[in-house]
Amino acid sequence: AQSVSQHNHHVILSEAASLELGCNYSYGGTVNLFWYVQYPGQHLQLLLKYFSGDPLVKGIKGFEAEFIKSKFSFNLRKPSVQWSDTAEYFCAVIYSGAGSYQLTFGKGTKLSVIP
Amino acid sequence: DSGVTQTPKHLITATGQRVTLRCSPRSGDLSVYWYQQSLDQGLQFLIQYYNGEERAKGNILERFSAQQFPDLHSELNLSSLELGDSALYFCASSVAGLDAEQFFGPGTRLTVL
């Protein structure tokens, strides 16, 4: 079965620090990649997605992610975090091939930003 | 507010029982997805329906089933419940297929005692 790994379970940063959350997937075929965020007490919402084209994807709230096919990675970055970025972040991958799809989420990374 | 509604918000039941969770997608969305979120397994994709038909299947147990009705709302049926089924069950909807942005509901928290 395909898998998605988010290596950091919990990341604690001070405001203004730079953020990079790792996401690696196991499939070498066609993939669509997503980052979702879940703020405390709120529902999951899409931060950004990659289907094709420029491997550097810009999302909402200053987030970006880079698709590196050779490394099977789609890391999420933000140059300067704010307290309001405290949330849980999920990487998701859609694997497609032979007319079927498989959608897999990572286990999530909790980000705590200290004012 | 994502526009996706789920009922009930909380459900407490006993092992061996059967429950039904309900989801109403955003207006205009044809796809509905069901997810299970637990501490040990994380967020697991269960199943997707598109315009009434099953489109993609994930890690859904045989004790679980779902359907999407002509008005596009969906129900997830969980039977022969076990303690390990206690989790948060999310529904999401999108305009079309798996590659479209999904809008998530607030979830139903199921507790099996």
Image (cartoon, rainbow, N blue to C red):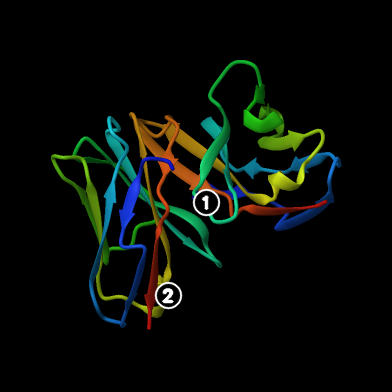
Under mark 1, the amino acid is Gln
Provide the residue designation for mark 2.
B84
Residue A30 image point, x, y percent: 51, 28
Is residue A110 toward the left or the right of residue B51 in the image? right
Provide the residue designation for mark 1.
A42
Whether B81 is drawn above or below A64: the answer is below
- Locate the C terminus of chain B and report the quarter of the image it occupies: bottom left
Q: Residues within 10 Å of mark 1 (few under 14, many from 20)?
A: some
Query: The residue marked by circle 2 belongs to what chain?
Result: B
- Locate the N terminus of chain B and report the quarter of the image it occupies: top left
Q: CA distance from mark 1 to mark 2?
A: 24 Å
| Res. A93 in view | yes
Q: Comparing marks 1 and 2, which lies closer to the viewer?
A: 1
Question: Which is nearer the eye, B52 or B7?
Answer: B7
Residue B108 image point, x, y percent: 38, 61
The structure residue drawn at horizontal position 27% and vertical position 33%, both measured from the top left corner, is B30
Query: The residue marked by circle 1 belongs to what chain?
Result: A
Residue A18 image point, x, y percent: 84, 39
Label 1 in the same subunit as label 2: no
Question: Considering the numbered disc 1 on the image, is that residue within a helix, a strand or a loop?
Answer: loop
Whether A70 is drawn above or below B104: the answer is above
Q: Residues within 10 Å of mark 2 (few under 14, many from 20)?
A: few
Question: Which is nearer the eye, B61 or A26?
Answer: B61
